[in-house]
Amino acid sequence: MFLSGMGRWNERVDRLLFSENRLAPEPPASDLTPESAFPSYFISDEMPFVPENWSLKVGGIVARPAVFTLDQLKRMPQKGMRIRHHCVEGWSAVAEWNGVQLRELAKLVGASSDAQYVEFKSFDNGYYSTWDIESSMHPQTILAYGMNGKPLYPDHGAPLRLYSPVKLGYKMVKYLTEVNFLPTRAGGYWEDQGYDWYGGV
Amino acid sequence: MAGSGLQILSAYPALGPRGAQYSWYPFQNMAPPSWLRFGGWLAGARHWHFAIAWFLILNGVIYLIYMIASGEWRRRVFIPTRDASNALAMFAYYLRVRKTPPPEDFYNGLQRMAYTSAILFGIVVVMSGLAIYKPVQLYWITAAFGGYDVARVVHLSCLVLLALFTVMHLVLVVLHPRTIVTMVTGGPRG
């Protein structure tokens, strides 16, 4: 009771602290983590590989629900950044990511202003997460298809993963299949097990 | 705070970022023993840590306000030119290197050093904690420490220093048991 109460208080503080205008600083290229040292995590028994005819379904309370192929996503305005990753375990690592801004996609499908949450689903054995809309619309929140100047590999969520400097790693769903704009809060793989739902840094 | 902090540390018991861990750290990849940990697992420990932190800070703020408002800070503050040699002499006396204690005020130099540094360690442990808790929303604090991984080292170091302070404090209280009464009542007005 005490812990859940304090948890709710902390989320309130986290939301107050958050600003869509505050951009995470980009570390210098000399800080890039060697690829072999950047851990990869998945919950399936084996590393998930892109299913044939993969596409991204975008839906929920949107005016124009749509299905996108990887090529279509790559043709949208691209955003690249070099960012320090923060894992809930306490380690950090630096990589470059490029992809399409989630806010761009939201505009394209006409996400309703009633959508206060965004749910992300994957083909990694049901791994999913739900974010607050503010963090989702942050300019550095992207759906990434490139890592360190190369196409995203299966070890880091190919063909598409959620990436943003404003959240802890467990909230950034890899192996994406669906993005749903929702009016009410949904859970997440780790969140359902007791990890902090907001997970912001 | 210490117990839940060590449980959190256990999830990545190394210092330094992935691919560039700090070679000087002797306990790299060695998790602290379970009897020192609190919270059961990473998520539980984090909930405790971020809940109790508020009370630690509140306690610290009330303590500082009282110290300043009552003027009590005057006889506790460590001023090196006045207190450093006295602190050293006091330490030598406790080690039995020196036969007699040096002349002392209400508080001796060693006490002043201890009370002043404890406050400093407390402030730094909180600031470095904020730096690793919100490295993006509070990035100016994180940057001031030299980045996330450096702030993490500072945070752990402050734990060690505060633990040392606590141990020394308890040892000295045991050696001077009548001080327990003074600690509770505040003693004679100075």
Image: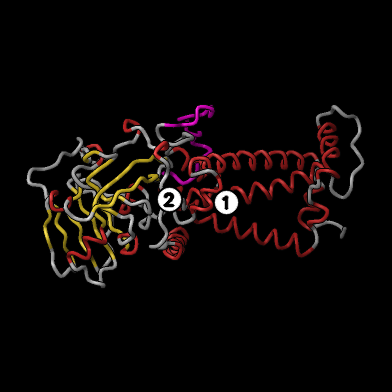
Q: Position of residue B20 (x, y in %)?
A: 44, 32
Q: CA distance from mark 1 to mark 2?
A: 19 Å
Tell me the amino acid under the disc marked 2.
Pro
Q: Position of residue B36 (x, y in %)?
A: 53, 38
- Residue name at image x 26 percent, y 50 percent: A162
Q: Which residues are magenta?
A: B20-42
As for residue B105 lying within the magenta part, the answer is: no
How many residues crowd mark 1 within 10 Å: few (<14), some (14–19), many (20+)? some
**Display coloring:** secondary structure
Residue A1 visible:
no
The numbered mark 2 sits on a residue in which chain?
Answer: A
Tell me the amino acid under the disc marked 1.
Met
Q: Position of residue A32 (x, y in %)?
A: 38, 37
Contact (Cβ within 8 Å) of mark 1 with mark 2 = no
Q: Look at mark 2 in the image and give the residue it sits on.
A: A25
Q: Residue furthest left?
A: A53
- Name the element at disc 2: loop
Do the residues marked 1 and 2 share a common chain?
Answer: no
Q: Look at mark 1 in the image and give the residue it sits on.
A: B127
Quarter of the rendering occupied by the N terminus of chain A: bottom left
- Name the element at disc 1: helix
Query: Which secondary structure type mostly characterizes the magenta part of the structure?
Result: loop
- Residue name at image x 45 percent, y 58 percent: A3
**Nearer to us in this view, A16 or B96:** A16
Residue A14 visible:
yes
How many residues crowd mark 2 within 10 Å: few (<14), some (14–19), many (20+)? some
